Amino acid sequence: MILKQGLNLNEINWPIILENLEKNKDTFNWAYHAGWADGDGCFSNKTYNLRITEEDPVYNLANVFLSSVTLTTPEKRPGHGNPNNPRKLVQLNSKRIIYFINEVMPYIIEKRKQCYKILEKYNVFKRYPYLMFDEKTFISYLTGFCEAEATFYYTKKISKYSIDISNSNLKLLKYLSKWLDYLKIKHGFYKVNKEGKYEFNKKYAPGRMINRKNCYRIYISGENAIPLLEKMIPHMLIPKKLNNAKSIVEHFKNR
């Protein structure tokens, strides 16, 4: 189901798409979408797919590329997704994905190999600088990555106010931790679970076992999160996580 009709990519429409991209190039938050790409984004074959339940980042990307947004078929497997809130999809390919990779590659940390493989399929052999962050672009990247991978806890009943960033890529999380140290954000860093077999979803798929990798977590609690959240909030797009982030800040500032 098409939620937003974009322009088909052809010789007539590409100049229109390119004009829109160039018009927004300097103001669009490429580092933010690099964070999403390293989180829930998928580089596959010759395409980039952002397929998530929250629509705001999807429309944000689709609008600048004048791409379509579609509603995916609800997941039928037990424990996978929310059938009442199916995922929204924006897909980039051909000249669109070449343009996208060209802009996000200075900030992509984990999925660089996938990007280079796609470019090679389009006969593009350009190489890109790595980890080209300043404070502004790092905060943007971290915001996108956290909207994909982190939980913003604002739970009054158990007095839990924190940011939990979990991922199986130890190298990536260590890099984020170094930046947090540089920004003087106090945080914890630890292993969540060991590699092995675990029950996938006790409530919706009892008995189904899956193999998990080692998972690691950055934990930023209480008032320690305030300076970081104040930098991230202007870049956040997902309403629930944005509201929780604002509530954490207000909770400690109004005490």
Image (cartoon, helix red, strand yellow):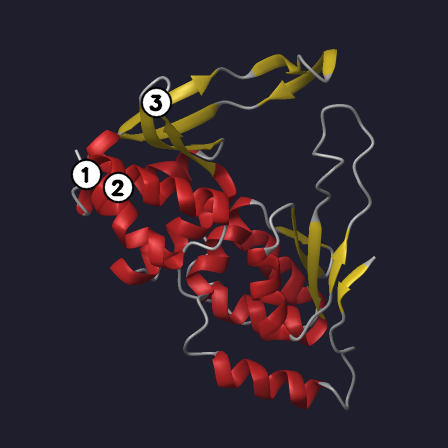
Residue 36 location, x and y as percent?
52, 52
Viewer-nearest residue: 82 or 92: 82
Q: Residue at x 40, y 50 (%)?
A: 143
Q: CA distance from mark 3 to mark 2?
A: 28 Å
Q: Which mark is residue 250?
A: 2
Residue 252 location, x and y as percent?
21, 35
Does residue 254 appear to the left or right of 241 in the view shown?
left
Residue 200 location, x and y as percent?
66, 18
Q: Please rate how many residues cluster around mark 1, counting C-alpha atoms within 10 Å: few if below 14, some from 14 to 19, many from 20.
A: few
Tag 2: amino acid? Glu
Q: Please rate how many residues cluster around mark 3, counting C-alpha atoms within 10 Å: few if below 14, some from 14 to 19, many from 20.
A: few
Q: Residue furthest front?
A: 254
Badge 3 or badge 2: first in the primary sequence: 3
Residue 198 location, x and y as percent?
62, 13
Q: Which mark is residue 154?
A: none
Q: Which mark is residue 190?
A: 3
Q: Are marks 1 and 2 in contact (CB under 8 Å)?
A: yes
Badge 1 or badge 3: first in the primary sequence: 3
Position above or below: 64 against 34: below
Q: CA distance from mark 1 to mark 3?
A: 31 Å
Q: Residue at x 55, y 24 (%)?
A: 213
- Which mark is in front, 1 or 3? 1
Tag 1: amino acid? Asn
Position above or below: 135 against 250: below
Q: Which mark is residue 254?
A: 1
Tag 3: amino acid? Tyr
